[in-house]
Amino acid sequence: MTQAKQRFLSFEEYLSYDDGTDHLYELFNGELIEVPPEAGLNVEIANFLFALFLPIVGYRRIRGRGLELEVRGEPRNRYPALTILQEEHILQLKQRNTIRLNMAPPLLVVEVVSPGDLQRDRDYIAKRIQYQDRAIPEYWIIDPQRSTILVLALVGDRYTESGTFQGNNVVESPQFGTLNVTPDQIFAAAR
């Protein structure tokens, strides 16, 4: 990851920054850390899920990796692989594709785990804590290396495991019900 030299004292100051590129940055301890491009496999999985959710929620309520989510802790922002928005977000995101802390949380965030222990810990531990704190009702961790989909549901103020799906088990979502898709189908579509 490349570090930019700019330093920011607040998230608001960061939001006004424009380096004239389409690069994505995480704000970590006041410094910008450039987010590397997503692996092709991860993009294909996210695209498959986009198509899966399209008839359920419509195109305006689905966002890919470009959606920025302000969170507490470090870094101060995340870019989920896929996000299902609430209806109110559509108008709120017209100017900037950032869900701020003072806005309602999205309905669902999905992360696709990249290879490596650091990436695994980031998705299974760090992001889980930040998304739970953000009160996001549902969080999916899609793990191509383990060929599993972990579905977490917010119960009270804690995530509980709604299910770990693998093979030909049909994926079930606490909010969207039975989705008529299996992990095998999702992973096969990305190979």
Image (spheres, rainbow, N blue to C red):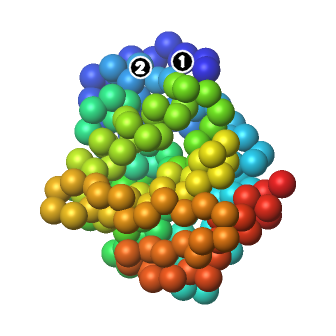
Q: Which residue occupies 56% across, 37% down? A: 24
Whether residue 95 is visible: no
Residue 89 vs 35, above or below: the answer is below
Q: Which residue is mark 1?
A: 4
Q: Which residue occupies 78% across, 57% down? A: 190
Q: Is residue 42 left or right of residue 92?
A: right
Instruction: Please give the label number shown on residue 31.
Output: 2
Q: Residues within 10 Å of mark 1 (few under 14, many from 20)?
A: few
User: Which residue is farthest bottom?
Assistant: 55
Residue 50: % across, % down: 63, 69
Residue 158: % across, % down: 22, 54
Quadrant for the N terminus, please.
top right
Q: Residues within 10 Å of mark 2 (few under 14, many from 20)?
A: some
User: Which residue is farthest right?
Assistant: 191
Residue 33: % across, % down: 51, 23
Q: Which residue occupies 47% across, 40% down? A: 123
Residue 71 image-quadrant placement: top left
Residue 39 vs 13, above or below: the answer is below
